[in-house]
């Protein structure tokens, strides 16, 4: 029970201070889950991000469910999901109840402009972290370029790109193993 509460609390705190979605929380996840608690490797979290990108729903919620489930089964997944959505639910409910024209207030627009810059920096940090872990050879660079062009130029579905990249990775790694024998 203690660990379920800990899972809930980690994701609750993370959600309360993270603006910008799932990728913006990656540095905090790294610190809380990998560095501080050693619950899993950074690579495992990146795998969860990759799968979550191709699934329906919010990336942060999906990742919290995966991590919680890995720690404490289904109840851990539920604890992670409740933790990640809790602050958002409370904050949005209060804002909606108090202010119908909240987004038109100059102070709110200015605050969100500042937050947007912060979120961009957090996402850039997440991208550089992912880059260092994922793009480690020419194959990784090639897959990255193809996926980036597929999304940016052709607006291909992330699911198609993730599945294609997974298949390509399996085929190439298998081919390399057979050649090295």
Image (spheres, grey):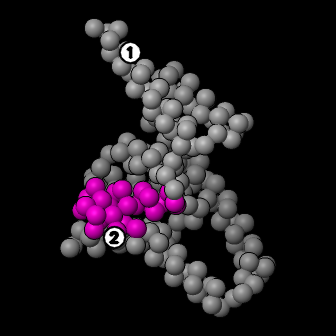
Residue drawn at 34 percent across, 57 percent down: 67
Res. 175 mark: 1
Residue holding disc 2: 79
Q: Quadrant of residue 154?
A: top right
Specify the principal SS of the magenta part. helix
Q: Count the numbered circles shown.
A: 2
Q: Residues within 10 Å of mark 1 (few under 14, many from 20)?
A: few
Quarter of the image with the N terminus in it: bottom left
Residue drawn at 48 percent across, 60 percent down: 60
| Image position, residue 41 (x, y; %) | 32, 45
Separation of marks 1 and 2 at Cα, in angstroms: 41 Å
Residue at the left extreme, as displayed? 1
Magenta region includes residue 76? yes
Asked whether the viewer can see residue 13, the reply is: no
Res. 155 mark: none
- The front one of 95 and 168 is 168
| Image position, residue 35 (x, y; %) | 33, 52
In this rendering, would 75 be left or right of 175? left
In this rendering, would 56 be left or right of 29? right
Position of 65 relative to 52 (above/below): below
The magenta span reads: 57-81
């Amino acid at each position: 029970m203690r660990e379920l509460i800990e899972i809930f609390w980690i994701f609750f705190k993370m959600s309360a201070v993270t603006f910008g979605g799932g990728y913006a929380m990656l540095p905090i996840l790294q610190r809380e889950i990998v560095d501080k608690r050693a619950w899993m490797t950074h690579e495992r979290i990146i795998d969860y991000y990759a799968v979550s990108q191709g699934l329906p729903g919010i990336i942060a919620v999906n990742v919290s469910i995966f991590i919680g489930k890995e720690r404490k089964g289904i109840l851990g997944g539920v604890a992670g999901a409740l933790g990640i959505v809790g602050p958002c639910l409370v904050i949005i409910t209060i804002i909606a109840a108090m202010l119908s024209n909240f987004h038109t207030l100059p102070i709110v627009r200015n605050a969100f402009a500042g937050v947007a810059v912060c979120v961009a920096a957090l996402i850039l940090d997440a991208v550089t972290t992912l880059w260092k872990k994922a793009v480690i050879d020419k194959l990784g660079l090639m897959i990255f370029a193809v996926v980036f062009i597929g999304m940016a130029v052709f607006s291909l579905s992330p699911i198609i790109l993730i599945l294609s990249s997974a298949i390509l990775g399996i085929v190439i790694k298998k081919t390399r193993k057979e050649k090295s024998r």
